[in-house]
């Protein structure tokens, strides 16, 4: 009996927390109604794309990298709507297809890399670039996903969870339609050309697969931010450089960085920037909100290129202007 009571209390608690969380996620007005409704259209499907184009029209891109966004019903659109210029999917190779989810037991047939990310991106870019056609080749600079800032690249970070080489080769195979249209960032003939989408391999992605073609690449590596010194990583083979905050700098108590931690961070950021890489720390504290905001504020001030965020709406409202001058 006592057991049952405890269980009941726990269930109520979990439901309450869940409700509060959901509410926090969809708090302001019409766009949120759109997002909420999108998830209801049958499958875990994506919105009709003209709808998407409309509601992405006024989005101002900001330096956030949306993490864990597959928890949401429409992960890609939630990230894009907040203006995040980076999005991330945990990818598993199962039965020769790529599934998206935070652990293997959560995978379902309808949540694939193709259905949640690649198809909708293809769709958005086709609408943004109506005049380019596959046979006429690529003449003009293609427009990216953000109408307000068409040259902004969107990084698609693939966190490979299963066997590295096999999974990443499958990713390379599945992005082929985007590559053929000229919509992926490339390294070609010694030059990096950013396109609408920058494909980045992380997790189990093997660096040797990323660099196996020495003259032509359309995928980049997520280089370890705390191991850049004397390394091979630079913008010809990598795009992001990242590390867990605690691994890089130790525990940040109550959101306050010690001087030694700030110095360490400066060195890491300098290493990344000298190599032309975008620096990012992951596993940032998300709670309490004051601690999270203090950490965000310091990282932005010190010159981190993208903030890893779970709450994209909060990120959309953060102040991105307070940077120290060099
Ligand atoms: C999942 O996708 C299949 C087709 O692959 C479809 O028939 C089915 O209705 C979808 N299920 C849900 C719950 O959306
Ligand atoms: C695509 O490009 C080819 C070659 O330039 C041209 O012949 C064709 O009409 C174009 N198709 C469309 C739909 O614009
Ligand atoms: C985008 O880049 C192209 C080529 O680099 C340039 O001609 C164009 O002016 C840029 N557009 C904007 C809006 O910055
Ligand atoms: C690298 O890619 C280019 C362009 O696809 C191709 O022509 C070349 O053969 C590739 N090189 C190797 C070593 O695979
Ligand atoms: C980037 O790194 C590779 C591998 O270490 C090196 O061969 C190349 O010269 C470097 N390129 C630049 C522009 O630094």
Image: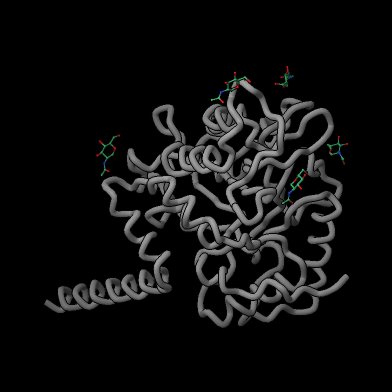
Residue 169 visible: no
Viewer-proximal residue, 271 or 261? 271
Query: What residue lies at 77% left-to-right and 71% top-to-bottom?
Result: 302
- Which color scheme is applied? one colour
Viewer-proximal residue, 91 or 191? 191
On the rendered image, what quadrant is the N terminus found in? Answer: bottom left
Query: What residue lies at 36% left-to-right and 73% top-to-bottom?
Result: 23
293 left or right, relative to 25: right
Where does residue 161 sit, x and y in percent of width and height?
51, 42
Where does residue 154 sit, x and y in percent of width and height?
62, 49
In the depicted structure, whether residue 271 falls above or below residue 125: below
Indicate the quadrant where residue 285 lies.
bottom right
Indicate the quadrant where residue 112 lies.
top left
Residue 110 visible: yes
Farthest left residue in view: 1
Viewer-proximal residue, 302 or 266? 302
Quarter of the render that holds ligand 5: top right
Indicate the quadrant where residue 246 lies.
bottom right
Query: What residue lies at 58% left-to-right and 80% top-to-bottom?
Result: 291
Viewer-proximal residue, 135 or 325? 135
Where does residue 40 sit, x and y in percent of width and height?
28, 54
In the depicted structure, whether residue 48 falls above or below residue 97: below
238 left or right, relative to 81: right
On the rendered image, what quadrant is the C terminus found in? Answer: bottom right
In the depicted structure, whether residue 273 falls above or below residue 212: below
Query: What residue lies at 81% left-to-right and 74% top-to-bottom?
Result: 324
Where does residue 276 sit, x and y in percent of width and height?
81, 50
């Amino acid at each position: 009996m006592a057991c049952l009571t405890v269980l009941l209390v726990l269930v109520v608690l979990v439901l309450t927390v869940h409700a509060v969380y959901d509410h926090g996620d969809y708090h302001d007005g019409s766009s949120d109604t759109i997002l909420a409704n999108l998830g209801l259209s049958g499958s875990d499907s994506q919105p009709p794309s003209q709808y998407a184009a409309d509601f992405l029209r006024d989005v101002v891109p900001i330096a956030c990298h949306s993490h864990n966004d597959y928890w949401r019903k429409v992960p890609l659109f939630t990230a894009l709507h907040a203006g995040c210029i980076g999005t991330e999917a945990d990818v598993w190779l199962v039965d020769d297809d790529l599934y998206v989810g935070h652990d293997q037991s959560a995978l379902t047939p309808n949540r694939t890399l193709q259905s949640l990310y690649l198809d909708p991106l293809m769709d958005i870019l086709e609408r943004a670039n109506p005049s380019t056609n596959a046979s006429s080749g690529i003449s003009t600079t293609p427009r990216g996903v953000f109408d307000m800032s068409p040259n902004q690249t969107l990084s698609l970070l693939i966190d490979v969870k299963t066997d590295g080489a096999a999974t990443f080769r499958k990713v390379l195979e599945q992005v082929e339609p985007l590559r053929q249209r000229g919509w992926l960032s490339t390294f070609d003939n010694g030059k990096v050309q950013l396109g609408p989408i920058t494909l980045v391999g992380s997790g189990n992605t093997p660096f040797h697969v990323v660099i196996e073609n020495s003259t032509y690449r359309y995928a980049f590596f997520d280089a370890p931010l705390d191991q850049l010194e004397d390394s091979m990583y630079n913008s010809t083979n990598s795009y992001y450089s990242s590390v867990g905050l605690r691994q890089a700098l130790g525990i940040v108590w109550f959101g306050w960085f010690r001087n030694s931690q700030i110095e360490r961070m400066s060195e890491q950021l300098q290493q990344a920037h000298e190599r032309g890489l975008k620096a990012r720390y992951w596993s940032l504290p998300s709670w309490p909100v004051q601690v999270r905001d203090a950490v965000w504020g310091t990282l932005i001030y010190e010159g981190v290129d993208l903030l890893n965020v779970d709450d994209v709406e909060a990120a959309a409202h953060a102040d991105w202007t307070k940077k120290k001058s060099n």
